[in-house]
Amino acid sequence: MPDMKRVLGIDFGLKRVGIAVSDPMGIIAQGIDTIPNDGELIGKVVDIVKKMSVGKIVVGKPLKLSGEAGDSAVAAAKFAERLKDKLSRESVDAEIVEWDERFTTTIAQRTQIELGIKKKDRQKKGNLDRMASQVILQSYLDSHR
């Protein structure tokens, strides 16, 4: 059996970054954390990649409805490039993929409601970012089965 590597999903935001990870077989996504977008973000993501044996990183690309890249998509692409550089410098072999994340926040909000999560808990932004990263990753995993 080949060495199983997990897939990491990232919902990049200017204030917070949602993190999700797949099971080793790459079937199920699970939201695991929300990290502040600060000077330590890249290092924290690299630590997660190392600890969890991640072989691929899916970074959500928030395109406009028209498909154009707006400021948020440009910021996510710059983040992906900085992460790639840091992984390379630390000799960590993990491929980075940008993935269209249109509607993931809406899907995450609806999912929270359907799961019966209390409004007070839904209003905690970190919970939404974590779930959005899970939605991004699950859509990627489902499309590659």
Image: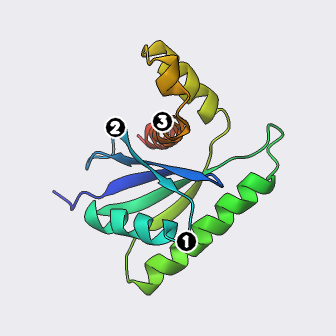
Q: What secondary structure is found at the residue carrying circle 1?
A: loop
Task: Kindly identify the amino acid type of the residue bearing the numbered disc 2.
Answer: Ile
Residue 142 image offset from top left, x and y in percent: 45, 36
Q: Which residue in the structure is indicated by mark 3?
A: 127
Residue 135 in sight: yes
Q: Which residue in the structure is indicated by mark 2?
A: 28
Name the front one of labels 2 and 1. 1
Q: Quadrant of residue 6?
A: bottom left
Task: Kindly identify the amino acid type of the residue bearing the numbered disc 3.
Answer: Asn
Q: Quadrant of residue 52?
A: bottom left
Residue 85 image offset from top left, x and y in percent: 53, 80
The local crowd at label 2, few if under 14, some if 14 to 19, many if 20 or more residues have their Cα within 10 Å, is some
Task: Kindly identify the amino acid type of the residue bearing the numbered disc 1.
Answer: Gly
Residue found 74% across the figure and 46% down from its top: 63
Q: CA distance from mark 2 to mark 1?
A: 30 Å
C-beta proximity under 8 Å, tags 2 and 1? no
Q: Which residue in the structure is indicated by mark 1?
A: 39
Residue 12 in sight: no
Residue lying farthest front? 120
Name the front one of labels 2 and 3. 3
Q: Quadrant of residue 134?
A: top left
Marked residue nearer the N-terminal end (2 or 3) = 2
Q: Foreground: 78 or 58?
A: 78
Q: What secondary structure is found at the residue carrying circle 2?
A: loop
Q: CA distance from mark 3 to mark 1?
A: 21 Å
The local crowd at label 1, few if under 14, some if 14 to 19, many if 20 or more residues have their Cα within 10 Å, is few
